[in-house]
Image: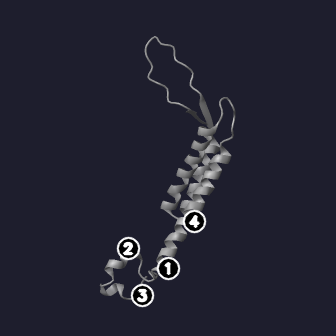
Amino acid sequence: FAGLLIPYKLPSKRKKGVKTKKVRTALLGGGDIGFPLIFAGVVFKELGLWQAMIIPIFAMLGLALLLFFSKDKKFYPAMPFIGAGCFVGLGIVYLLMFLIWLFFWINDYSKVPLWHKHLHHLDFFEEDVF
């Protein structure tokens, strides 16, 4: 996979007979796209779906920061920004998982998860199944 060309600004509608201006574009290589995909795939395998869905959002935010703060006609490698976004996203995932665990620990929901709390009156849930 060679990469993608991403325009900095969306071109306006083209009119007949009017000369079009060249639009500045950013080139993303295959690794710039493949790394967040593989990173999110590993997070999905090891942690779960909602955790993996957060990673591409932060990778996109890292790329958006690069495109927003870059200077005209200057080359910037995208991988440090995308990689930093992936790792910041992973840190946010771990923080959210810790806060969820802390919530369950403080409220002593260790035997019955929150989403099964309304089923505690049923007989088969009174055993120590959870």
Q: Is residue 75 above or below residue 12?
A: below
Dot 4 amino acid type: Tyr
Which element is circle 2 on?
helix
Q: Mark 4 and mark 3: span between their CA atoms?
A: 28 Å
Compare marks 4 and 3 and give the one earlier in the sequence: 4
| Numbered label attached to residue 115 | 2
Compare marks 2 and 1 and give the one earlier in the sequence: 1
Label 1 close to label 3 by CB (< 8 Å): no
Q: Tag 4: Cα neighbours inside 10 Å, few (<14), some, or many (≥20)?
A: some
> Furthest residue to the left?
122
Q: Please identify the quadrant where the N terminus is shown.
A: top right
Label 1 close to label 4 by CB (< 8 Å): no
Dot 3 corresponds to which residue? 128
Q: Mark 4 and mark 2: span between their CA atoms?
A: 21 Å
Dot 1 corresponds to which residue? 105
Q: Position of residue 72 (x, y in %)?
A: 65, 30
Dot 4 corresponds to which residue? 94
Q: Is residue 28 above or below residue 90?
A: above
